Image (cartoon, grey):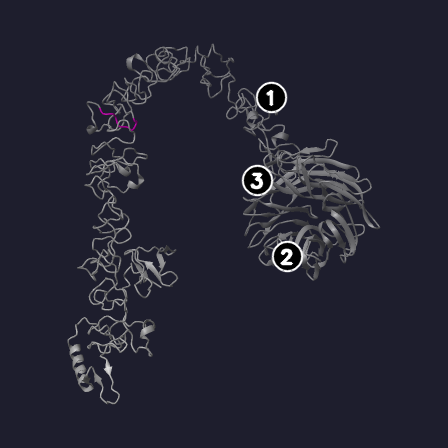
Amino acid sequence: MPLDYENILEKDIIVKNANSEPQFLTHAGSNSGHVNASFIESTIDGWIVAGATRNSMQFGSSISATANSPLNNNYEADMYIAKIGDDGVWQWADIPDASGGLIFLETLAPGQGGEYYVGGSFVGTVSFGPHSIQSPAFVLEGFIAKFDDAGNWLWATGYSSLNNGTSEVNGITIDLQSGNVIASGSNSGETNFDSILINSTDRDVNLVGLDPISGAVNWAVSSGGIGSESAGEVLVDKTGKVWQMAFTSATFNGGGGNSHQAVSNQDTLLVEWTLNSGGAAVSTLRAIPSGTSEVNLAESMTIDPSGDIYVTGVFVGTINLGGQKTVSTSGNYGDIFVVKMSPQTGFDWIVSVGSSSATEWGYSIAASDSGDLVVGGVYSGTTSFGGKYITSTGGQDNFMAQIDNSGNWDWVETIGGSSDDLFGGVAVNATGNYSAFGSFQGAINKGTKSVSSTFGLDLFVWVVDPANNADADSDGVNDLTDNCPNTNNPLQIDSDFDGDGDECDYDDDNDGITDNSGDDCPRGGAWNWTSNSTTDFDNDGCKDATEDNDDDNDGIDDADDGCLSSYAPPRNWWTSDSDNDIDQDGCRDADEDNDDDGDNFTDSSDDCNKVAGTSTLGLKGCIDNDEDGWANTDDSCPNSFGNSSMVGTIGCPDSDGDGWADQDDDLPDEKTQWSDQDGDGFGDNQDGYNPDACVDIPGSSVVDRYGCPDPDNDGYSSPDSSWTAEDGADAFPLESTQWSDYDEDGLGDNYGNLSWYDRDSTWPGEYIQFARDQDACPAQYGESWKEDIFGCPDTDGDGWANFMDAFPFDADEYLDSDLDGVADGKDACPLFRGNSTEDVQGCPDFDGDGWGDPEKGSDWNPIDPTQWQNSDGDQYGDNPLGNEPDSCPNEKGYSYKGGILGCVDSDNDGWADSIDVFPNDPTQVNDTDGDGFGDNPNGKNGDLCPEIVGVSTENGSKDNGCEEIIEEAASSVMVYGGIGIGVIVVILAVGLILSRLSAKEDEKDWNTQQIANSEMVMQSNQGLYQQTTQMTYQQPMVSPQVQSPQLNQLPGNPMAAPTPLAPTMYDVGTMRSDGNEWLEYPAASGAWYMRDPTSRQWVRKI
């Protein structure tokens, strides 16, 4: 019997993508940022590429091009062109000068004589070599420029728009009959095409013919409809008709009945123009329509040698060309479409490529001279091109695929790095090679070629020979290497290695037996051998040594046949069955087999020799379903493997191996325990694991002892008569966050206050989140409870812990906010430290006399420790032993001279009325001679003779305190009271001397006393005592002490109450941003004080 090679080879065959060796793979890029690939065209000896950039570029090691647009920070505002040879070496590169604006590239096209054209839009001034174009306004305008194969710019033409219009060029082709350059584009507003004006209300498509030598516009036409239209590529068919791609989301009306109403978000149109003497006119309109809310976008079109036109792009939803030419996307993402259209008959077919999980996009299509087409674009994930599967290496990759003119995919190749890649275009050269142009990031490997990007996205040019991917039988194997090029043979199996694949070889193993004439092993095994009785005993075409698994054909595979060589041929054939070969081992029971049931127990020792069994304990060789060694007949659990042996239960599962079957074991997973009377999960065996300390009472404790009641589930058991809290039982059996009480004060040792982490490490207890009844002093008995501080010593029993109680021995007080030793409950100033004791307790007492400073205290003079009371409200204190004591404490007065302070001084001269001879005359105090004239000669009624009693004048009034002078008319001697003038002079002189010598010490000295204001003196001497001259010196007057807070107005002359020289500590200022309290004192004086934060006194700063 042969090995089943057919089944081994039969599988679902997935034809993977082609992967040929590139003709070349090269790159270019920038050291400073991304570069985009856009277009590629072939030359006679290489390829021309073009694209957009915002960065300066390097092509190979020696060619560079500098970006120059000032708008590159915002846009890719420069374009580049470059040439690479067929050897993959860059030949030249150029970036037009856009330093005066920007340029957007939209198309690249070959000319007739090896020249090339680029088109797009520009702003400002752009120079293509020596040829400059300028937009009249700073808006986008279309342009076309021509260059030769060496990169020399030949001419440039720009459009110009008026009235806020814009224009652009989207495609270029050559009319082979006239040689004219034909440009496809769009414009809005009024656009000047080299003096040909076209006015479009909204955006319309246009077609422009230009002179290929000068770039001058020969003609310009436009077409459109309701809404905005845009244009794409353009080509000329074999009949000279021009085909332009256009896009509309509304109504396109080309005239002559050629119109299309789009129902999708965007349809693609193929507009046929017929050239005429005036330029061109729309002659046919072919639509590629999608359904409502769907969209399609054609990216590229080409024409093959037979004149058929092909279009590729992307669509979402459906495209219905009529006549069952319909495609739908595979999911909610975009799919690729390819359409073939005959210019004469319309659309021939449409195909699509897509997946349900990503977007596939056809960007470019080109036709070869053989009529095949190459399509390029991007894809993600896994996608099938007609059964040819490709899978991206990372993100979005590029592909290049060949499709024939019937819509069949021939092959597909991919290229890409680990990041998202971008695609530019494909092209075909004269030798039939395909090229792809794109952008990549990271590294790309194709065959033996590899490139790596420099900075961001770089350019790649990838060229392949399609012949390396030819596959006539569509088996995914290139014809150049296919061992059956015309027969589908994807696995390329060649069993006999003769060069012909098995799919096209009539004797695959070359054994002399043809595949279809009795060879049971035609392929996949031995090869190049000859079948005979020696090599193939049963002549089945399977070589006995390597292919045939039943050499004697008895129905038992050789691997199971125990009697392959127990006889010598020839022998009558027999076939093994259940009657003659119970164990189907290929040995006949009657004469060949001594173990009929094949259970490895000889028939003589097998207790069940007709039934295969494995039992080894008790009966041997009998059926043991659970394979635990016990025959089913002895096994208490015949279908469950086990090794139990206790209490008559044999062979049942015993998970812990203690001999007790799990069904009898209360703790089947613990080998030291098997009985649990109270069912709490703790075994009764006191020598076993976690023995139950309360075997008859269920419990869950696990810390101090196992299996005892633990109502709060904290692991500690509840205390009982044999196990107390001192032994380790739970001191708080109903509180799960506490279990120990070291100081036995009824509060637990555990704490839940995070701020207690730094507590004494020797204290009992541990941190338990949300711990209740926590003892703040777990090592000391205590009954404190205030402010959530429980369990600390509280000597006076007021609830405040001693360490918080400022008065731990006073149950009525605990707080001393200002730390002055006076409890807040008794402290008249609880927030200000003070030592007052007389009038108020604990208030500031600046002078330390025991009397509190205002405002809480009553100290009249807070800076004088000897005075604190001023009963009569003047400026002198009542304490007779203090500084400046009040001589009249119960009578308000301001005297301050003659040793009598604080008594009534009616005339405000400083002398108390009690010692002032003239209490109502501020200019006189004493009258030595008692004649009514004051001793002050300059005062009012001053005594010119203070030691002599004066007499009245003839009219009875006193004059100057001297004795009356009597003048006799004829005498030359003046008589003073009857005494001669000479005697009087002597007496006066002696008297004055004696008077001065005997004057009291406290008699005022006129030269040392305060002098009264002269103006006041003059006013006092008006009336009867007018003087004719001003006094030469002034009288003294009272000067009240400025410290007196009660001084308002002295009797006699009015005086304002003096203002203190500086603010007191009780004056209130304003807090400033520097954190200090400031006060302007007096108000509006410009004098500023700052309060010292320590002494609380004001200190002048300004």
Mark 2–mark 3 distance (CA, rounded to whole Å): 32 Å
Q: Quadrant of the C terminus?
A: bottom left
- Residue 715 is one of the magenta-drawn residues: yes
Residue 616 percent across, percent down from the top left: 34, 15
Q: Residue at x 24, y 39 (%)?
A: 800
The local secondary structure at tag 2 comes to strand
Residue 459 percent across, percent down from the top left: 60, 50
Residue 487, image quadrant:
top right
**What mark, if any, has residue 93 been given in the picture?**
2
- Residue under label 1, please give it: 518
Q: Which residues are magenta?
A: 712-719
Q: Residue at x 71, y 51 (%)?
A: 168
The local secondary structure at tag 3 comes to strand
Taking depth in this image into account, of 809 and 21 the one nearest to the observer is 809
* Residue 1033, above or below 460: below
**Visible in this render: residue 296?**
yes
Q: Please give left or right for residue 653 compared with residue 473 in the image.
A: left
Mark 1–mark 2 distance (CA, rounded to whole Å): 70 Å
What residue type is disc 1 on?
A: Gly
Disc 3 + disc 1, Cβ < 8 Å: no
**What mark, if any, has residue 392 been given in the picture?**
3
Residue 598, image quadrant:
top left
Disc 1 + disc 2, Cβ < 8 Å: no
The local secondary structure at tag 1 comes to loop
Q: Please give left or right for residue 1071 compared with residue 419 in the image.
A: left
Please tell me whether mark 1 or mark 2 is closer to you in this view: 2
Label located before the other in sequence (3 or 1): 3
Badge 2: few (under 14), some or many (20 or more) residues near its Cα, within 10 Å? Answer: many
